[in-house]
Amino acid sequence: MKSIKTILATVIGILIFNCGHAQSVNSKKSIEKENLNQSEFINLSNAEEIIQSFVSDYRHDRFAADAMNFGIEVTDHGSWTVNVSGLKSETEWEVHLESGLPEKPTFIYSIEYETLKAIHEGKINALTAQGKAFSGDYTPMRIKQMEGFEPSMEKNAKINPFSFHFWTLGFPEIIPFNKGMTRKAYGSNFTAFYYETGLRTAWYRVLPEERVRDDAREQAAPFPMLIIAIEGTTAGEVDGQSVSLSKGNTIFIPAGVAHRWWNETNEATEAILIMFGKGA
């Protein structure tokens, strides 16, 4: 039988360890958690847990080799800092989540909570949530610059592809699209696919009687584009000339050429939009 001294020493040791461990955890600003596997990415409701799932996923993304520091604020739910160090251990990249906004000026994702949940559940993607025709348009997710943050053109150009990779779970990265996963811009419903310097891609679904790029400010882009019809027939006007774009056809729009579209049929029409070249 163990002596009373031995038992007391064991109990005291356990108490000291537990208290010390609790103080250590609570005193840390970092809110790191163990990596979540794909099955744990679903059914999260807490904003912090949802963001942590993106952080955990990004640790296994090859694009985490590029260092990035930014903030996330979720309306009425709090704010966080994410630091992507660009360093790698034996199994994963270093990506850390901390409470509060960054101390040094950088960019911030400002997101409505329901949009954060929808992105996490695969109901919409981050680039679609941010998409807009004009700078003053409302979006449920937007990028803000902290006071004093003056990114170079190169750093600014990295934000769109980074947004895609950080906010898309899993590998290989899959972008679902259908009529329930769109937002509206330029007059019709769209899902953004992927943006990086020199390339923008999206899917458009034009409902009956909808008009696309009907506003004169939207009609000419500083870069060329291809419109690939995948469903129905859409009427249009390119540089003043009437055109009809039907399923199975692709039209090339040169840079600076005005164009607009409308759906005169009783069914939705669909097209893939590829914008490319300098300025895209």
Image (cartoon, rainbow, N blue to C red):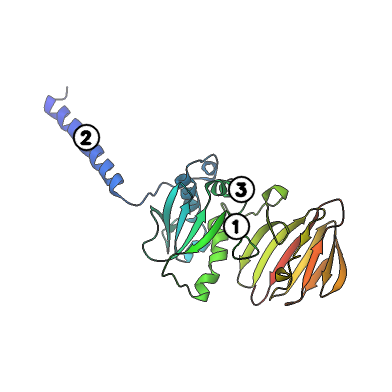
Whichever of callouts 1 and 3 sits on the residue coming sooner in the sequence is 3
Question: Which residue shows up at 61% across the image and 48% down it?
Answer: 122
Please say if 251 is above or below 269.
below
Residue 257 shows up from this direction: yes
Which residue is nearer to you in this view: 242 or 248?
Answer: 242
Instruction: Give the residue type that dot 3 points to.
Output: Gly
Which residue is nearer to you in this view: 266 or 3?
Answer: 266
Q: Position of residue 141 (x, y in %)?
A: 56, 55
Disc 2 to disc 1, C-alpha distance = 54 Å
Disc 1 to disc 3, C-alpha distance = 21 Å
Q: Position of residue 112 (x, y in %)?
A: 53, 50
**Circle 1 sits on which residue?**
138
The quadrant of the picture occupied by the C terminus is: bottom right
The quadrant of the picture occupied by the N terminus is: top left
In the rendered structure, find residue 100 and report the number of the disc placed on it. none
Whichever of callouts 2 and 1 sits on the residue coming sooner in the sequence is 2
Q: Position of residue 83 (x, y in %)?
A: 42, 60
View extreme (top): residue: 1
Whichever of callouts 2 and 3 sits on the residue coming sooner in the sequence is 2
**Circle 2 sits on which residue?**
15
Q: How many marks?
A: 3
**Circle 3 sits on which residue?**
122
Helix, strand or loop under label 1: loop
Quarter assignment of residue 80: bottom left
Of marks 2 and 1, the one in the foreground: 1
Instruction: Give the residue type that dot 2 points to.
Output: Leu
Question: Which residue shows up at 62% across the image and 60% down it?
Answer: 131
